[in-house]
Every structure is written in C-alpha cells, then in structure tokens.
Image: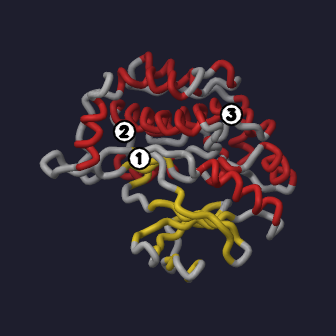
C-alpha cells in the first residue's frame, strides 16, 4: 500500500491495538525508513475530529526531545487518520521483561528516569501521554529509551467522554489511573501513575493488576492497594507506593520530582547481553550522552 504517493507500507503491521495499527514503511521521497500509525475511532469519518487532530498534531510536533520519536507527517488516507513517525530500532520494555524476567533495580530506575525526562518535556507543552505502558517504551541498543505512541495525547477530555459513552476505552486498563477510569480526565500525574505501574512490572516481571475482564482490572485500579516489591530497597518501595496513590495530589508533584527520586537507584547499570551494543563497539549515542552529562552536573 502506498500513501500519498510517498509512503510505501510493509504488508504486515508491526503491532496493533484498539486504537489502530502501526506499519513499517519507506518514505520514497526522502529515502528513509518510517513508522506509520493509522488511528481508528468508532463512528467512522468525523470531519470535526479530523480537523481537531490536525491542530493538535501541530502541538505534538513541537515536542522535541531525544527520547521522543519525531513526528514527520500527519493526515488522512482512505478516510483514516495517520501519523508518520521516525522509525525506532530497539526492543520494547514489554519484550525485554518477557525475555529477561524482572530487571535489575538500576535498569528499572534508569528506564523510568529516561521516561520522566520525556514526560517533563511533554508536560511543559501541556501534552499528557495517557497511555504509557511497557509496549510504548523502547530500549535502544545504545541504552537510550524512547517513549512511543503519543496518539492518545491528542485527545482532549471532551473527546474522551464522547468515546467512553459509545464504549471505546481510551487507554490500557492495566496502566490507567483511577481518575482516568472514573472520570476520563488525565493530568501529568496520571502519566506518573502509569509509570508507577510500569516500574512495578519491570521489577517483578508481572503486570500489577490483572483480571478476567477489563472492568475487573478497573475495580482493582480504583480500590486495591498494590503489593510491595520484594528484594528492592525500602526507599524504592516507598517511591512506587507514592506513584500508585489513588488520589493524584498524593503522588509526586511532577516528572522532574520523580526523576530526582529515581537518581539514587539508577547507578552501576549492568550489561544486558543481547539487548545493548557492547562497550567494545563505538556507540555515538552513548558518546554524545556522556558529554551532555558533564554539562552543569
């Protein structure tokens, strides 16, 4: 399939979910690999929603951070909205945990801290991710982390209420904050709650809240206290408990605060064989990051 006489898509999607599907592709105009996501919504074509997405995409395009893929293009094809993004090579945190099992504390903290840096930039632009989860965090061979799929970030609260009424769940139940479930309203602290769920999962190798139905998971998110994580420093357990507070005002104030609290645990990161470029191989990304880290430490 070719979009706009420019983007040649692979036959099979890289992944898909309730909101759409992501394809690898090639931009033949600029001769580069891209990722193309189709956004799917109930009710079919909606011109007002399409225009709103175009406006909000301009806001998302302002999110310039090394940990966020670049939004190259945005439009409609065959009455479907699509995003064209920078193609990221790496492994999702979901696959990393599935293959490796529970991650060492330094790596779990480092991945979460890098996600905080991206959220800090997004929140400064009043962009909430709304769907942070292990499949939307990618570990690259140089050890950097990319936060993927800001598609739901472009939906405002009014849209959430509209789609919830007609049975479309916006978000992933296992990582949705209580306030998203109860009122459909997301804030920066909702993203921190989701990151708390991810951090808990990275350290245990298991999803925090599970159930036979989405509504069973919703019930646990709203009412059940999360168990602590065994074998980790007590201060880290306190931090996770703070992130998973049911009331947003009881969580860390913002992504910057969380980043600072994660710092003591993100030290002496061990090698992850098979997932990272070994130290013996030059890594331009790590070379660059080391110098940046020396600026006003």
Residue 16 relative to residue 110: left or right:
right
Q: Which mark is residue 204?
A: none
Query: Residue 98: horizontal and vertical position, in percent?
Result: 42, 51
Q: Residue at (49%, 42%) from the top-left corner?
A: 206
Query: Residue 72: horizontal and vertical position, in percent?
Result: 52, 61
Q: Which residue is mark 3?
A: 187
- Seen as rendered, the residue at the extreme left is 280
Q: Secondary structure at mark 3?
A: loop
Q: Which residue is mark 1?
A: 97
Rounded to the nearest angstrom, the CA distance separating label 1 from label 2 is: 7 Å
Residue 194 relative to residue 140: left or right:
right
Q: Residue at (57%, 21%) from the top-left corner?
A: 252
Dots 1, 2 in contact, CB < 8 A: yes
Rounded to the nearest angstrom, the CA distance separating label 2 from label 3 is: 28 Å
Q: Quadrant of residue 91?
A: bottom left
Residue 214 relative to residue 174: left or right:
right
194 or 142, which is in the foreground?
Answer: 142
148 or 107, which is in the foreground?
Answer: 148
Q: Which residue is mark 2?
A: 103
In the picture, which quadrant includes the C terminus? top left
Task: Please determine whether, in this image, residue 269 is positioned above or below residue 132.
Answer: above
Query: Residue 27: horizontal and vertical position, in percent?
Result: 46, 74
Q: Residue at (22%, 49%) from the top-left corner?
A: 283
């Amino acid at each position: 399939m070719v979009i706009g006489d420019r983007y040649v898509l692979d036959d099979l999607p890289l992944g898909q979910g309730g909101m759409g599907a992501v394809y690898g592709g090639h931009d033949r105009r600029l001769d580069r690999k891209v990722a193309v996501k189709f956004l799917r919504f109930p009710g079919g074509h909606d011109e007002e929603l399409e225009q709103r997405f175009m406006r909000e995409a301009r806001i998302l395009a302002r999110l310039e951070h090394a940990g966020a893929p670049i939004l190259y293009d945005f439009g409609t094809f065959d009455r479907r909205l699509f995003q064209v993004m920078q193609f990221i090579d790496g492994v999702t945190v979901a696959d990393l945990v599935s293959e490796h099992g529970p991650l060492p504390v330094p790596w779990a903290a480092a991945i979460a801290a890098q996600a905080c840096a991206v959220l800090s930039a997004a929140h400064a632009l009043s962009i909430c991710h709304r769907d942070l989860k292990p499949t939307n965090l990618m570990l690259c061979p140089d050890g950097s982390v990319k936060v993927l799929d800001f598609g739901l970030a472009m939906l405002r609260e009014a849209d959430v209420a509209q789609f919830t009424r007609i049975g479309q769940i916006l978000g992933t139940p296992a990582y949705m904050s209580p306030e998203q479930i109860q009122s459909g309203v997301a804030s920066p602290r909702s993203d921190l709650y989701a990151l708390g769920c991810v951090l808990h999962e990275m350290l245990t190798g298991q999803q925090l809240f599970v159930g036979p139905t989405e509504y069973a998971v919703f019930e646990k998110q709203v009412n059940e206290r999360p168990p602590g994580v065994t074998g980790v420093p007590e201060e880290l357990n306190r931090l996770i408990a703070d992130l998973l507070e049911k009331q947003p005002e009881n969580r860390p104030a913002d992504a910057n605060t969380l980043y600072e609290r994660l710092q003591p645990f993100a030290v002496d990161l061990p090698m992850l064989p098979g997932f990272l470029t070994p130290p013996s191989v030059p890594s331009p990304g790590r070379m660059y990051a080391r110098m940046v880290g020396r600026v006003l430490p």
